[in-house]
Image: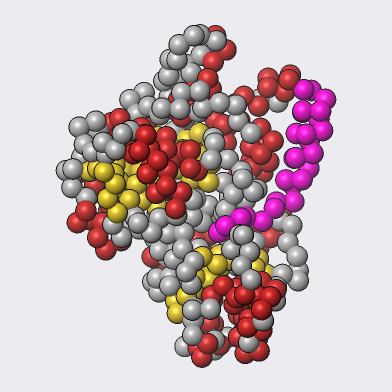
Amino acid sequence: MHSYNKAFFEQLDRQDPLRRFRDEFVLSEDEIYLDGNSLGAQPKAALAKAQEVVAEQWGTDLIRSWNRHHWFQLPQRLGDKIARLIGADQDEVICTDGTGLNVYKAISAGLSLRPERRVILLEGSNFPTDNYMVQGLVAQLGHRHEIRFAEEDELLAAINEEVAVVCLTQVHYKTGRVLDMAAITRYAQERGCVVIWDLCHSAGALPVDLNGCHADMAIGCTYKYLNGGPGSPAFIFVAKRHQGAALQPLTGWWGHAAPFTFERDYRPAPGINQMLTGTQGIISMAVAEVGIDLMLEASMEQIREKSQALTQYFIELINSECAEYGFVLASPEDKERRGSQVALSHEHGYPIMQAVIDAGVIGDFRAPDILRFGFTPLYTRYVDVWNAVSRIKKVMARETWRSPVYNQRHAVT
């Protein structure tokens, strides 16, 4: 076990090739924000962008902004930018709707490519939206399809010629575990399955190569590591080889081949535009572009290198400074199999996290017993790791988490 001190981490910050990006975000010096895996920090330029869109584009230019400020093309423009972050080509990604709706679209489209098959394979421990949306879809389709659940060590055994669609999350929302996208995609496609990846916890956190892995489809969000803002739009990827054949059923007018001809009957757009439904949230989408643009300025390889270092130092310090307090590492020990977060389990996880937040270390809790700490390399400093563990240790040593105020459950954990 290495012996670290604060000066060691301050020196790492001075050498950090990403250090300039922290100044691009609104962050308090009194708090250590380790929840970018749930909601990214606000880019400083986002406020000015929101004011421009609301006061000038909407307030002054009004409906002319659809053309003058290219509102109508925002989903495609942001999609093409996101494509560069996830190993996709231009015209393969579109920014639209929310993650849940895009899960529905992708699974529906995947099933349309394999009409002779009836099985959808998911991880039971998925973020619930993925499972819930598929359960609703199956009910809507008259329960003609079967959902099968498998966890990481069961996945390959569960993938066979009965499965139409395999839908998996690359980085697990709770533990931060990373699946081998290339290997699983290849294995599933050799058995005739359509493979869909959820990138909510990997887009912007580590290098993703959808086309290099020959993925069929993918979905993801912009409000975590892409720093798009609360409720900012999601995105969907459809490989060009499937466009025009993999059709989604929410056939709104923006997904029509020629929306402004106002035809009576639906004709699907031939490319990625078919994944659109109706009018998008322009203000939110315009603000999300600020965070996406910042991410495009950075090196994804440097982001991943720093991410692995931050999480490794945090784990080592927790092990050395908080060994007596009952924390158990729930994330993979191998940095190659770990995303940009560290999950710790503890039987008193909820009150401990509330006390830790009150001490100025912002993480979150996931039932039944997981404390999550996310590390966003664009703005998380190395010294934040040292300071965070110091504050966590004080909370545990003083047992402040036992206070009744920290044991009262909030609506959002």
Residue 234 lies, with reference to residue 269, above or below; the image says: below
Q: Residue at x 46, y 23 (%)?
A: 251
Please state if 320 lies on the left or on the right of 187 as rendered.
right
Quarter-wise, where is residue 398 in the image? bottom right
Q: Residue at x 74, y 19 (%)?
A: 64
Please state if 25 lies on the left or on the right of 174 as rendered.
right
Please say whether residue 57 is one of the residues in the magenta stretch.
yes
Locate the C terminus by quadrant. bottom right
Please state if 127 lies on the left or on the right of 9 as rendered.
left
Nearer to us in this view, 143 or 53? 143
Residue 47 lies, with reference to residue 375, above or below; the image says: above
Residue 144 lies, with reference to residue 21, above or below; the image says: above
Please say whether residue 121 is one of the residues in the magenta stretch.
no
Residue 388 in percent (x, y) is at 63, 76
Residue 95 in percent (x, y) is at 54, 36
Q: Is there any visible trace of residue 294 in the rendered image?
A: no
Residue 108 lies, with reference to residue 370, above or below; the image says: above
Residue 27 in percent (x, y) is at 73, 61
Please state if 142 lies on the left or on the right of 218 as rendered.
left
Q: Residue at x 75, y 40 (%)?
A: 50
Nearer to us in this view, 268 or 212? 268
Which residues make up the magenta segment?
Answer: 34-62
Q: Is there any visible trace of residue 329 in the rendered image?
A: yes
Q: Residue at x 66, y 56 (%)?
A: 41
Residue 301 in percent (x, y) is at 49, 57
